[in-house]
Amino acid sequence: MGKVSRRRFLQGAGLAVFGAVAGAGVARSSIFPLPPSASAATPSATPSAGATGGSPPPDRTFVSTKLTTPHVDVWSSGPTAAGLVFAGPMGHGSNGLIMDNAGHPVWMEPTGAGVTDLKVQQYQGKPVLTYWSGKGIGGHGEGTGIVKDTSYRTIAEVSAGSGLRADLHEFRLTANGTALLTAYPTVQFDLSPLGGSTKGYMYDCHVQEVDVATGRVLFDWKASDQIPLDESYDKPSDDSTADGSTAAKAFDPYHVNAVELRPDGYLISFRHTHTIYLVNTSGAVVWRLGGKQSDFAIPAEGAFAWQHDVRQRPDGVISMFDNHYKDGTVGTSRGLLLTVDEKKRTAAVKLELARGGHRGNAMGNVQFLDNGHYFVGWGSDPSATEFDAAGNAVFEATSIGGGSYRVYREVWTASPDTLPDVAVLPGNGSTMQVYASWNGATEVASWRFLTGDDAASLAESVVVKRTGFETTAAVATAQHVAAEALDSTGKVLARSAVVKA
């Protein structure tokens, strides 16, 4: 594939809301139109992983709903951790996707909103579905954090404070009822330390902690107050479209992309400085890990670059997705776990998670699973891999659109507040084909199709086992049809509207 910068990748992806899309009635086009060189973003080099080469298959479509999603290929070699797979496919159908281990959709974001970082978090002691939603602007985003309950009702929307718009890179809830956010305001700044204009323009990254319930800003940290520009590995001259000569061509010296709350402050990742910073609650930098000014001795095998998703783990471990290469550079991406001794200022590789030559020059993440496994999303390489505790691959999904900012495995039980969808196609004259789906429902075991010539007096025609997102059956021709979603005990979870056949 031709090399595509992260900035161009996300700009091309759009991350824009193209207008509301009704789940059952309006056709939709791609919300993430990628440039041609990014739409095939670094396919897997592992044949066993399901990569077929060439153009991806057409998006998956259905009869009972107009929602669409990528045809995701899956591969497995052993038991996985519990849960479903959460992704944000770019360039293909729904931008927020929950799918099962077979790659079949369970929930597709129904409105057409731009979505990144779809995952399950805890809010007020309950599991919630969260994501960032908005539009992409020059490699970052402007939008809000969304919190939904297990019925997919929005219960909170979180914005950045101080007149800023929340960036797409981080929306992380804390046990304190707060959210960690990033923001990329454009400011005029002296770029001469990196060879730019003395009156140039740049993105001055902010990190904020915001109270979810009230919107009150509890912490607001600005990169330029603490981090000299010359720590950056980028220069204004590297890209004429982002050289800082005008506000529209703002230079990005820092590129904050992850924030983690610790008892002693905030762990912050800057992609463009190859550095992880510990910042205390007063805003001062306590130490740097990696980059040009590292306070830690890091062995050659532990060196990282252009990293994403930096997280503090127990026992002094810091994990990250080590992109390790960018436009024109070499390297193979990996999940990286470092054992960090903050007193001795040393770091050592604990575990490396690599697979089949996967290379994601943008985005990516590493998740720790409850059974000791690890889940790695490969970012612009549209794949995700689950590894066992020893680092052996046991599951992989490929062709996740044109890439996904992060990918997770999460335990999620949900009952939508919408009704199931049902549709009918003609059969051979004496029969008709009926279809049912219920976007986001996780507990449906079977479907009961009801038919009759009187819409007010329908009778059971057939009960069939649920088969993927959409279930179909042939029934005798009738004037009206409805569908009931049943759980594993046969209890009716919900009933669709009656449709005329």
Image (spheres, rainbow, N blue to C red):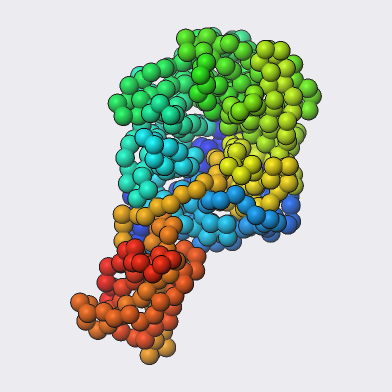
Q: Is residue 339 above or below residue 393?
A: above
Q: Residue 365 occupies which quadrant of the picture? A: top right
Q: Residue 476: x percent and y percent?
A: 36, 86
Q: Is residue 203 above or below residue 458?
A: above
Residue under the image location 20 percent in, 77 percent down:
456
- Residue, far front: 489
Q: Quadrant of the N terminus?
A: top right
Q: Is residue 15 above or below residue 246?
A: below
Side (left or right) of 375 relative to 497: right
Q: Is residue 112 above or below residue 191?
A: below
Q: Residue 135 occupies which quadrant of the picture? A: top left
In-front residue for pair 172/253: 172
Q: Residue 440: x percent and y percent?
A: 41, 55
Can residue 232 be seen? yes
Q: Residue 378: x percent and y percent?
A: 63, 42
Q: Residue 191: x percent and y percent?
A: 56, 12
In-front residue for pair 124/382: 124
Side (left or right) of 195 relative to 11: right
Residue under the image location 30 percent in, 67 percent down:
496
Residue under the image location 43 percent in, 60 percent down:
443
Residue under the image location 42 percent in, 88 percent down:
428
- Residue, far right: 300
In-front residue for pair 472/441: 441
